[in-house]
Amino acid sequence: AQSVAQPEDQVNVAEGNPLTVKCTYSVSGNPYLFWYVQYPNRGLQFLLKYITGDNLVKGSYGFEAEFNKSQTSFHLKKPSALVSDSALYFCAVRPRGTGNQFYFGTGTSLTVIP
Amino acid sequence: DSGVTQTPKHLITATGQRVTLRCSPRSGDLSVYWYQQSLDQGLQFLIQYYNGEERAKGNILERFSAQQFPDLHSELNLSSLELGDSALYFCASSVGGTDLEQFFGPGTRLTVL
């Protein structure tokens, strides 16, 4: 069965420090990989995606993600956290060639402490 | 603002009832997706429509149904509601049927009492 795991429900980081939000997946083949962010009372917003090529993907708002095929991971990173980055982050995968069904992780709540 | 609109924002109803959630995709988008977000299950894909036709089906209960109309708006019908159906229901849209980027609406919060 396809699954996406975000092992940390909550991540706290001090403002200005680097942040990492973890994601691992168990999906057949080489899926497309995504990160979305959800602010309170809002829908999900696209941050970045990995299709192919360079393992380090750059996205919106200074975020980047590192794809590791051997570890089937796609961790979200940012060199210097802002208080405004506090939100709920979702990792998602879409298997290739199987329609357009996305599988989401359960989300990680990021709190950036001033 | 993603350009995807959902109505109503909030809905409170009783067990056994039926409700309809509405979604208007971004202008030009042909695909609509429905998701259910609950505290214990996270974000679950329910169903996708592309240009009026069902394209992909996820964990959608038989009590739930959806359709996409000629003007491309979509409705999600939930019937015989149970307490466990209380959740946030999101609609998303994309230009094509297999696009990698989806644009999410603000959601409809359903509370079943």
Image (tube, rainbow, N blue to C red):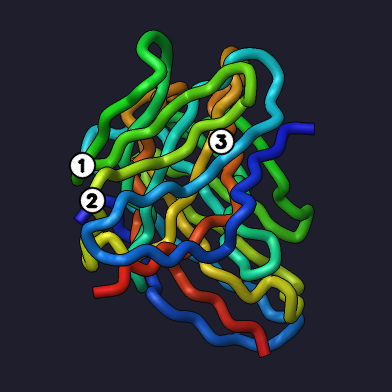
Q: How far, Cα to Cα, is label 3 from label 1?
A: 24 Å
The residue depicted at 59 percent of the width and 14 percent of the height is: A30
SS at mark 2? loop
Q: Circle 2 marks a residue in which chain? A: A
Q: Circle 3 marks a residue in which chain? A: A
Tell us which disc is closer to us: 2 or 3: 2
The residue depicted at 69 percent of the width and 67 percent of the height is: B40
Whether residue A77 appears in this view of the structure is yes
Quarter location, residue B41? bottom right
SS at mark 1? helix
Res. A80 mark: 2
Give the amino acid type for the residue marked by disc 1 in the picture: Gly
Res. A102 mark: 3
Tell me the quadrant of the picture where the N terminus of chain B can be found: bottom left
Whether the residues at callouts 1 and 2 have beta carbons within 8 Å, the answer is yes
Relative image position of residue B75 (x, y in whole percent): 49, 55
The residue that mark 1 highlights is A62
Whether residue B30 appears in this view of the structure is no
Query: Would you place residue A67 above or below residue A46 in this image?
Result: above
